[in-house]
Amino acid sequence: MEIKKPAVAGTLESSDLMVTVEPGSNGIELAISSSVMNQYGRQIKNTVLETLDRLEVRQAKVTVVDKGALDCTIKARVECAVFRSCDQSQKNIPWGGAIV
Amino acid sequence: MAVSAVSQQDRRGVARIRALLERVGITLDAHLDYTCAIYDDEGEPIATGSAFGPTLRCFAVDPDHQGEGLLNEIISHLMDYQAGRGMTHLFVYTKPASARFFCDLGFYEIARVPGSLVFLENRRRGFSDYLAALSRTARPGSACAIVMNANPFTLGHRYLIEQAAASFDTVHLFLLSEDAGPIPARVRLELARRGTADLAGVVCHESGDYLISKATFPSYFLKNEDTVIRAQAALDTAIFAKIAQALGVTCRVVGEEPTSHVTGIYNEIMAKTLPQHGVACRIIPRKALPDGRVISASQVRQAIHDDRLGDVADMLPDTTLSYFRSAESEQVRAAIRREEDVIHY
């Protein structure tokens, strides 16, 4: 999928995260800040990158501000931000899948 | 807890927000686009935050409700609101004591005025990327910088640049990127480029998000109290000092400003604080015409407004004059004529 416009999903409340995606031209540029960076930073990064890969996002600036979210929350917020950024959120979304 | 918008027309509601802010020592800004709050069971506000342009500001959490994560909810709500109107590059002003809360919420410090305020953005490499891009335009030899609105470019601006170029190898010329009047930024930049094309040492830049923008220095564009202007001018000076460092600039050259109140204060703050950052500040007196009139861009705008461009022809370089005489500038001239007050306060 192509990131067409900036989009945000999630909140900054505890156990959640806020994901911002913006159009990019330099591959995936990912910036993460997390309240549990030392313990789970690598895992958060992997989950975000896997989700983006499954959605076939190749070019994007992605900012993640994590407040200790579980993996399922991270996936859901990343998917939501990506779908919003390409106006898919009004349509029938194959949550957990890729859009062809 | 639900976050709700506070209507600017709701005077009682706004008064209660103001009281909450004052309890933690903050004044409600005069210019805000949007204010939101969280209320307790009795309907009293216990947390609040506001937005103006790309900035988030005027935060307070009732001392009895601190440590409940209310600020996070307010920020989430404001970021949603900002994203909804297409703004994702956001800035925060806050007291130095509160800056750490924002660092936990994905904001990164750009600059601070010790004891007064800290300025942050939500991009980790936002400001450092901007500095890196600028430093690629640095040239060997001595360098100074001028920041101008050039609204529009006059012989006064040209004189200031010539004075600077006489003592420095390179003059980094920053044109304000913010559209704050009838003459659009791209026209101001283009006229400055044309007006300095023959000067080899001049490098033109757009000032971007960080230098005298609506984010860093809103009171440059909108009337405000002197204390607010001073704080924002000091912040702008701190940001400029970092830009100067990236470019190898050792001196800021400014034009004397006897008529504009806000620029007058700005110059005074720069003269006082730039040397503390290791940058000299040189104020150049205005150039007067042989008949004693002082060259001034607001006089030029007034003349265009009154359709008597000929009266100020001797204040303008040929490049600016021919632009305003050509069909190319028809829309801009029409916009100036529509403007009621063309003088910068």
Image: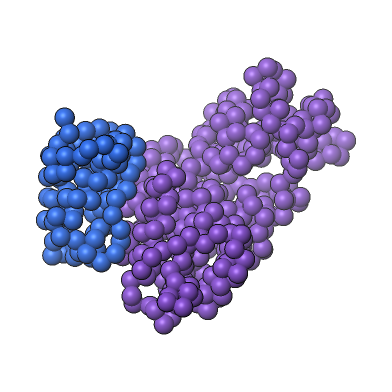
Chain colours: A blue, B purple
Give the residue drawn at x 17%, y 50%. Answer: A75
Q: At which x and y percent is residue A56? A: 16, 35
Q: At which x and y percent is residue A88? A: 27, 37
Q: At which x and y percent is residue B118? A: 45, 64
Give the residue drawn at x 21%, y 33%. Answer: A1
Question: Relative to B145, is B283 on the left or the right?
Answer: right
Question: Relative to A1, is B127 on the left or the right?
Answer: right
Residue B337 vs B212, above or below: the answer is above
Q: Residue furthest bottom?
A: B64
Q: Residue furthest top?
A: B327
Residue B256 vs B334, above or below: the answer is below
Q: Quadrant of residue B229?
A: bottom right
Locate the N terminus of chain B and report the quarter of the image it occupies.
bottom left
Does residue B6 appear anywhere in the picture? yes
Q: Residue furthest right?
A: B291
Give the residue drawn at x 28%, y 40%. Answer: A89
Number of numbered labels in the structure image: 0
Is A87 in front, or is B238?
A: A87
Is A93 in front, or is B198?
A: A93
Question: Relative to B70, is A34 on the left or the right?
Answer: left
Residue B165 vs A38, above or below: the answer is above
Q: At which x and y percent is residue B340? A: 76, 40
Is B343 in front, or is A56?
A: A56
Does residue B168 appear anywhere in the picture? no
